[in-house]
Amino acid sequence: MKNDNRDRIFVDDARLRIRQGHPWVYDNQVLRIEGRPQPGGVVQVFDVKKGPLGQGYFNPRSKIRVRMLTKHLDEPIDAAFFHRKIAAAWTFRQRMGQPESCRVVFGEADGLPALVVDKFGDILVLQTLALGMDRYKTEIVQALRTVLKPAGIYERNDVPVREKEGLTLEKGFIGEAFNTRLVISENGLKFAVDVAMGQKTGHFLDQRLNHAAMEHVSKGARVLDCFTHTGGFALHAARYGATEVLGLDISEEAITLATANAALNGLDSVVAFKTANVFDFLAGQGRGSATWDVVVLDPPAFAKSRAALDGAARGYKEINLRAMKLLPPGGFLVTCSCSQHMVPDLFRKTIAAAAHDVHRELREVHCGAQPADHPIHWAIPETHYLKCLVLQVL
């Protein structure tokens, strides 16, 4: 794709977000446009004083009008550019000692906004979530094949956010077909993955370190894993010595896969899974029908937009309050949020408010986020989305 630098956009960067490294230019920051930039095309970006900010790809349909790719006005955005970026991302993962199944490209944090690449063994799963990045799919695939030499690549562009970019939803093989059902390893446990049918890219790779934090709270414990999905926390609890584990999820498909994962690891005598609405289940348990030593809360993102934050905070408070009611003094609450809008301080305040309302005290055992293959870029707060607290409830 030709890199046409004739088109220019002048923006208000009064808060210095872009100059400090944040890659998003919102529609209300655009002061004027010179030329006729094509949707998905590369434009030069300048501040109000005509100081150069770099280059990015443009989309007039998106609220994020430009996503920055480089701070250099003269750097070609071509196959060589994507090869350099992807090679750098993979070198970083290797240096950080990431496992064979990990995230290879984490979008904005790797300087490739709206690009996600996950690696499951020798299979790669690709998402191009914005128009400009989708235009370079051929160059991206070429770079991935050269740098990582995968056995196969699968496209999971069936994500609704693409529709906001004017893109269609699609998924399928890029190149030769292969068996999309795989088995990967995480902390010594086996997990079945279907890159064609699983959520997102087929499996959530970001809770690996927080799953491992179950080791010292699970031995000899009765564990309730809420929003279990494919059984990540539940199976780790069983592996680390829990005497009884119950995993809950509203999705029958998730429960079927979690049950299969328990059998795959020989843990089905300790772990059971049940299809249930977690809110209703916790409300029923609150009447004294059961007591658990450890309760895990790993819900989907309650706040998918900033406008939904107040309601999300109420939801997080409610489930944490109900979970604390089930725990005896000295029990453990493992509580997570994967919403970028629920920032760490607000998450802590929400949990603290729940503890106050049920007259319980909290002692922090573990504070976790996503692992190094999902790096947190300090200029891009949106990259810090995952929070996990292990708390002793006194």
Image (cartoon, helix red, strand yellow):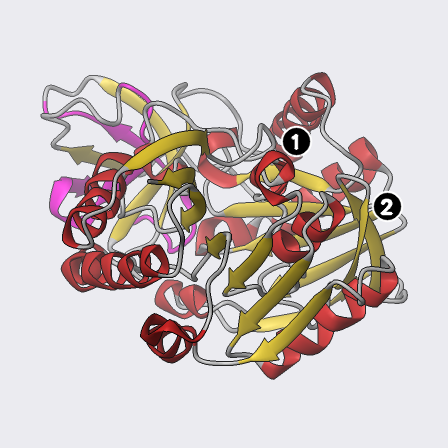
Amino acid identity at mark 2: Asp
Identify the image quadrant of the N terminus.
top right
One can see residue 318 in this view: yes
Q: Residues within 10 Å of mark 2 (few under 14, many from 20)?
A: few
Which residue is identified by label 2? 122
Q: Which mark is residue 33?
A: none
Task: Give 223 or 132, whichever is nearer the viewer.
Answer: 223
Q: In the picture provided, is 153 more to the left or to the right than 277?
A: right
* Above or below 381: residue 279: below
Q: Find numbered disc 2 in the image and state the secondary structure of the residue it sits on.
A: loop
Residue 278 drawn at (x, y percent):
42, 73
- Amino acid type, label 1: Ile
Q: Is residue 69 magenta?
A: no
Local secondary structure at mark 1: helix
Residue at the spot 40% in from the left edge and 68% down from the top edge: 166
Q: Where residue 387 appears, x then y in whole percent?
A: 40, 40
| Part of the protein shown in magenta | 20-48
- Answer above or below: position of 139 versus 180: above
Q: Position of residue 169 (x, y in %)?
A: 54, 73
Please tell me the numbered disc located at residue 86. Answer: 1
Q: Residue at x 65, y 80 (%)?
A: 253
Q: Nearer the viewer, residue 184 or 107?
A: 184
Q: Residue at x 42, y 77 (%)?
A: 281
